[in-house]
Image (cartoon, helix red, strand yellow):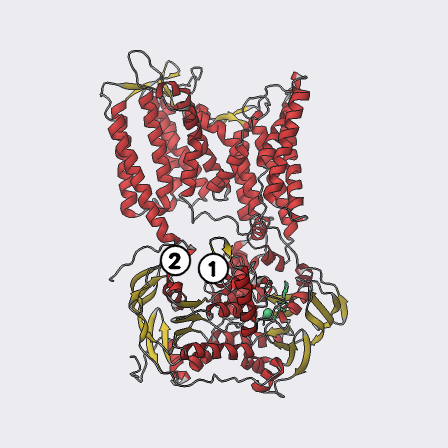
Amino acid sequence: MKLELRGITKSFGSLVANKDISLVVEPGQIHCLLGENGAGKSTLMNVLYGLLTPDSGQILIDDKPITIRDPKDAVAHGIGMVHQHFMLIPVFNVLENIILGSEDVRPWPFIDREAARTRIEQIANEYNFQIDPDAIIENLPIGTQQRVEILKALSHNAKILILDEPTAVLTPQETDALIEILKTLKEQGTSIIFITHKLREVLAIADVITVIRLGEVVGSTTPDEVNEEELASMMVGREVDLVVDKTPATPGDVVLSVSDLYVEDDRGLTAVKGVSFDVRRGEILAIAGVQGNGQTELVEALTGMRPVVSGKVSLNGDNLAGRSVRHILDAGVAHVPEDRQVHGLIPGMSIADNLVLDQIHSPKFGGIFGRKIKAIRENAEVRRKEFDIRSPGIDTAVGELSGGNQQKVVMARELSRELKVLICAQPTRGLDVGSIEFMHKQIVANRDAGAAVIIVSSELDEVIALGDRVAVLYDGRVQDIVPPTTSREEFGLLMAGARSTEATGVTP
Amino acid sequence: MSNVTTTPEIVTIDNLRTITRTRSLGYGISLIVLGAIEVLWFGSTPSSIHTQIQLAYNSATSVPELSSWLRVLVLVLGVLVLPLAFGPSVFSPLPRLPRAARIVAAIVGVLFVAWPISLWLGINQDGQIRDFLVSVSVTGYLFGAISAVVGAIVVWRRFDRLASPLLYAGIVLFILAFLIWVARITPIDNLPLPLTGILWGAIQWSPFLALGALAGTMSERSGVVNIAIEGQFIAGALVSTLVASAMNGTGISLWLALLLAGSIGMVFSWVLALMANRYRANQIIVGILLVSFATAVSQFISDAVLDVHQNLNQTLTLPTWNVPVLSRIPVVGPVLFAQNIIVYITIGMAVFTNVLLFRTRWGLRTRSVGEKPIASETVGINVFRMRYAATILGGFLAGLGGAALTLGKDTQFAFGMSNNFGYVALAIMIFGRWRPYGALVASLLFGFTASLGAQVSIWSGQTHIPGAFIDALPYAVTILVVSGLVGRIRPPAADGLPFVRR
Ligand SMILES: Nc1ncnc2c1ncn2[C@@H]1O[C@H](COP(=O)(O)OP(=O)(O)OP(=O)(O)O)[C@@H](O)[C@H]1O
Ligand SMILES: [Mg+2]
């Protein structure tokens, strides 16, 4: 179907998120939307899907104007959407989440679970997405949740499919699989709107690219006409340095030492199986690996969010294993959690308060009589400028920020203390190229200021760009610790469970 | 593995499991302590002292005899039915029945086996259930030993899932042992302990508590907190009595009374749903206002109408239904299977709400709306409509619960009769983990504790235990048991949160 948006304007209070945006998606076209964090991409899509009501503008399908009052109307018009923040019920299982809203009933009003199971298995096979229909969503790693969300959208046989940053949490293999699926759908005549910050993906699948900046369309192009650098500067409005610019590390003494660590996952299975490594001051240890190989549990154990079964974690010789989160944070460990919506932020609280969550018990921001509001506000103003958090003000609730700006709030908070150790899980998830550049600079600056840094990322590019050494995690064990100059093929093998062939003696 | 670390100091969802493990430690030790007290206190009674246990529910209950061949037939039937409860795991050709059917098979099987055996053992004398004597010290030793051994197993195996129900059972055993001790035969008096009467009392408590808890379950599953159940009890009780009395308690009037009691409950819930959905009011406040409203109106009607026209407030009751065959079983028959119709209605409603919430499309959507309404909306579900429906349907159950207080218990309406049971029903809903069968079981447990407590308070003269303490007992036990389930009890995530469309 052909989709056209005409002059969509949407504002939140004084902030105009979409300014007179017009867009045409032809049948069988993959239309990529590109733009900085907070540019208004999700807002536009939510308007299209009926979650937000536009102030003005018109939506046309096959040249006929339609009204979309709520998602029900959108679904009825054949529009499907994969949301940036998952729309899954955490306590339901995969099957229930996928069928919700389009359940088969036989006999009425009973849910026909067997039919649903067959249907899901069929779609999963068709698109080569392996998934256990009985798994409870909240027990699944975030990448798997994303797959469920995609399957859900696919199962509705949408004629117009919107994907809002579906690849932010997927592994490269999963992303490739998704791209194949999208190409198949495109051949079948589905119109696709695809939002991503990864320029390589854009160039790989887009038929048309539309760039939005500050709520306005700034240009439209095709992959043949541009390269990554040009796209980046179109988006951000300035030159962007796509390679991390860092000097070789000058590692000092060992700061954080992990030895023979065992950790269990939520189901009580051992997820981290005897991990040992050291991180020195002034170096970045990147932890690579396909999601679900123990990274989440490792980080949570290091930061006190998950009990340690056995093993040692010591910070400058002091034991951290089994200590409280408060103790660990106060000892100088900063933590950027994997899932900002669950662990990093309190969506209903203001930016200013979220920025001091970890220090509210310190005399700087809190006291016996409550918060020191002036100090908190001053701090927020500084951080907002420094980290370029795009929002109407520091009192905006964090939940109202765009996804990338939420991530910036977490980073801003964690990087604004005296640090001995910085642990970042997926630090640039959902950030635009400009912000990634900025974040990478910040991380390197922290390293150079003497912090020991651990970066966990499923993004190989990021691992290679940032890491001074790279530990590859596979099935809960450190497969090997190699230099970032190792070839991509070698990394691929290590991540798939093979032992390193060239025994590089970089382990200190 | 070396260097096993200590338990983390703070509670997060992730380390709750570790904490429940330590909880099983505390619960197990409590059981052992209870057992020790039983042995030391009751067990030390001279062994010649006995207590008379009354098994007849009341002296008028006569028990039909069974001829020898009928006894054998019943026994054979029981032996045949019982394996169905286990299914193919004991004998492979057996069919695998659904869980509810297995539970029914287990109950019927056990009763059918016990029935003839109890007759052979001479439980029945001249058409009456015989009382029998137990030794106070033997009870003390026996109960104490059971409690201590179970406690030790809980500690040893770290039974965190079972710790809390087992502690509950331990407390009940303790109270029973205590009652047996209080009722011991002395030269000056002999109070038989009415065991069956206590059971009967438990069932008297259950219907309205269960219906109230089911009402709460329904609306909270959709994300609306209904704290007005107390008010719905009052309104339902008043309306049912008025309607039935006005029509002089004829057969049809009782059913009409039930229907109208349910309807007034629905009106209350409609107001609540309207305030919660359209005006996004604080649901707790709205609930409290509804209760105050119901209380005030009921007082007015009670003073201005019922006191003047006494024929509008008659003592009426719904018919009793004797379940064929089962109601003829000695002891349990008249207690469990010859009950006021409201008991069966309550069980039916629990089954109905369970099927509705967990098997149907409507239920899946309702629960989704109670967990994460924004997600429901994105798949085209009308959040408000689901919330209205679930809350109002729950209102019917709460109103019915009001009728259970009057027509279900053979009592007339009295101001203040609901006695805050509406709030107790909410606790039972939590104890039942927002599940209909959970609500049913929890209401029975609460009823049983309350009934035991009532027995203790009847005898409070003998025990020197303050009456107020005894009245608090069921609540204290409930709180203890509910708190033991913390971490695994989780309310619907969007419970009480108004949904805001952007
Ligand atoms: N519900 C809301 N209330 C107030 N402001 C909002 C709301 N939703 C979005 N905004 C604001 O609108 C702007 C656009 O947000 P939007 O989510 O569309 O950005 P985006 O382009 O999707 O960015 P990202 O790449 O980070 O996801 C942001 O400045 C954001 O703060
Ligand atoms: Mg977005």
Amino acid type at image mark 1: Ile
What is the three-letter code of the residue carrying label 2?
Answer: Arg
Is the residue indicated by label 1 positioned so its CB lies within 8 Å of ligand 1? no
What residue is pinned by disc 2?
A267
Instruction: Give the number of the disc on residue A239.
Output: none
- The answer to whether one can see residue B267 in this image is yes
Q: Nearer the viewer, residue A146 or B495?
A: B495
Give the quadrant of the C terminus of chain A. bottom left
Q: Quadrant of the N terminus of chain A?
A: bottom right
Residue bearing mark 1: A360
- SS type, badge 1: loop
For ligand 1, which image quadrant applies? bottom right
Pointer 1 local density, CA inside 10 Å: few below 14, some 14–19, many at least 20: some
User: At x 41% / y 28%, what residue is drawn?
Assistant: B469
User: Looking at the image, which residue is at 69% across and 70% down?
Assistant: A18
- Indicate the quadrant where residue B267 lies: top right
- Kind of element beneath mark 2: loop
Viewer-side residue, A144 vs B181: B181
Q: Is residue A386 above or below residue B255?
A: below
